[in-house]
Amino acid sequence: AKILVLHGPNLNLLGAREPAIYGRDTLADINGRLAAQAQDAGHELSWFQSNAEHELIGRVQQARDEQVAMILCNAGAFTHTSIALRDAFAAVAIPLIEVHLSNVHAREPFRHHSYLSDIAVGVICGFGADSYRLALDAAIARLAPR
Ligand code: DQA
């Protein structure tokens, strides 16, 4: 099945951005491992990063036409602000797994609320780059066998 990984604003800077919080892995490192993990399980993974809300929304809408079966999304700060991105996920009705590198609940109060969590299948946060691996494990477990 097709799995899409969406990365929101500032995640293009991973590896260099606040490494004490977000770790040393780059986005390319993470995407490369996810692609291999998906392929081993017989799935097809693509990914998209944007700093622009409308581009992320456009990519979610496009996912419906492509018959994407599951979306993993780290929406970055848009998690806490974007009703529009939430509405896009609700509109396409593709199962969503919300991902964060950091434990947002152990950080500033403005990171405690997510516009995505209640429409997500589940949320994984706090495990650094491993959060993505764990989320992909969960996605693979839910998808029909090949
Ligand atoms: C983040 C947490 C968000 O609060 C923050 O704005 C990010 C990254 C994370 O992966 O821990 O950009 O989504």
Image (cartoon, helix red, strand yellow):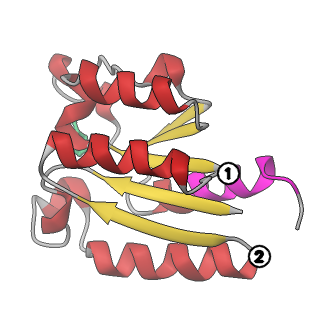
> Identity of the amino acid at label 1?
Ala
Looking at the image, can residue 126 be seen? no
In magenta segment, residue 143:
yes
Q: Amino acid at mark 2?
A: Gly
**Where is residue 129 shown, x and y percent of the image?**
40, 63
For label 2, the SS is loop
| Residue at mark 2 | 42
Give left or right: position of 22 versus 74: left
Highlighted range, magenta: 134-144
Between 119 and 137, the one lying in front of the other is 119
Image coords of residue 22 (percent x, y): 24, 57
Rendered view: 43 above or below 2: below
Label 2 environment density (alpha carbons within 10 Å; few <14, some 14–19, many ≥20): some
Label 1 with label 2: CB-CB less than 8 Å: no
Place residue 41 in its image quadrant.
bottom right
- Mark 1 vs mark 2: which is more N-terminal? 2
Of tags 1 and 2, the one toward the viewer is 2
56 sits to left or right of 136:
left
Front-lying residue, 19 or 61: 61
Q: Is mark 2 within 8 Å of ligand 1?
A: no
- Residue neighbourhood size for the residue with mark 1, other residues' Cα within 10 Å, grouped as few (<14), some (14–19), many (≥20): many
Q: Which residue is found at the position 19% from the left and 56% from the top?
A: 50
Q: Position of residue 51 (x, y in %)?
A: 12, 52
Which quadrant of the figure shows ligand 1?
top left
Q: Residue at x 17, y 40 (%)?
A: 53
CA–CA distance in space, label 1 to label 2? 12 Å
Establish whether ligand 1 lies closer than 8 Å to the Cβ of label 1: no
Q: How many marks?
A: 2
Give the quadrant of the C terminus.
bottom right
**Residue at screen point 36% across, 24% down:** 86
Q: Which residue is mark 1?
A: 139
Magenta stretch: includes residue 91: no
